[in-house]
Amino acid sequence: MIRLLLADDQDLMRSALSALLDLEDDFEVVAAVDRGDEVADAARTHQPDVALLDIEMPGLDGLAAAALLAERQPRCRVVILTTFGRAGYLRRAMEAGAVGFVVKDAPPEALADAIRRVMRGERVVDPELAAATLAAGRSPLTARERDVLGAARDAATVAEIAAKLFLSEGTVRNYLSAVIAKTGTRNRMEALRAADERGWL
């Protein structure tokens, strides 16, 4: 029996996935959570074989939760299950220790197959997404540039971003200028949109 943990902040999606996976004779959903910061505790308590993680969740996103699981529960295999089939997300998911990446519009049998394959020690990634990831290359943004751009998400002022990240305002301006140049955009909101679309944040 393959023990599964589900993490998705949408109640309907989580319930539907649980019901769907419970139909399989060799699957048992042992835990379902709606926040990324609940994943590690649920995994410690229920000892799943595979964790299916959405990317966008409150508390902690699925990529950060995957990295935490790799550190604390290394025997639990992580499959990212997301609406967002973006090349940048795939690369970051693999770097975080995920062994599978499945988009939510895949047929149900594809998800079941992916779970069984990762249990056999395989990596499972949509071939088109893998090709797009190779073509796109790595994100040009540094970790600090990502932090600054992420802090700008709420249309914060330079002073607010600086205070939040314990940086000087001049340093924040420099990071934002670098991000705008690297994304080929005209301002930070366009840069934010471009980075989101490419999965760099």
Image (tube, grey):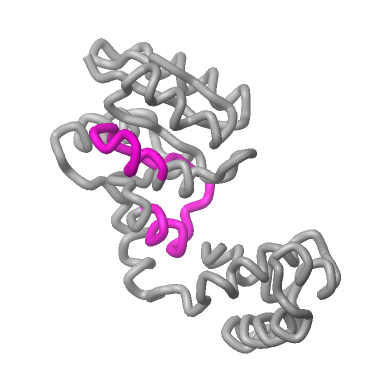
Between 99 and 142, the residue placed more toward the observer is 142
Quarter of the figure that contains the C terminus: bottom right
Q: Position of residue 143 (x, y in %)?
A: 52, 70
Q: Residue furthest left?
A: 120
Count of numbered circles in the view: 0
Reply yes or no: does residue 78 show up in magenta: yes
Residue occupying image coordinates x 36% and y 46%: 101
What is the x, y in percent for residue 155? 83, 65
The vertical placement of 25 against 50, above or below, is above
Q: Is residue 77 left or right of residue 195?
A: left
Classify residue 152 as left or right of residue 58. right
The quadrant the N terminus occupies is top left
Q: Can you say whether 156 is above or below 38 in the image? A: below
Report the side of 159 relative to 146 (left or right).
right
Task: Specify the quadrant of the image occupied by residue 18.
Answer: top left
55, above or below 160, in the image: above
Can you give x and y, in whole percent of width and height, for residue 46 in the image? 37, 17
Residue 21: where, in percent of width, then height? 38, 19
Q: Nearer the viewer, residue 25 or 76?
A: 76
Residue 5 sits inside the magenta stretch: no
**Which quadrant would residue 153 be assigned to in this image?**
bottom right
Q: Which residues are magenta?
A: 68-93
Query: Which residue is at 33% across, 13% downward?
Result: 28
Q: Residue at x 33, y 46 (%)?
A: 98
Residue at 37% x, 13% y: name it: 22
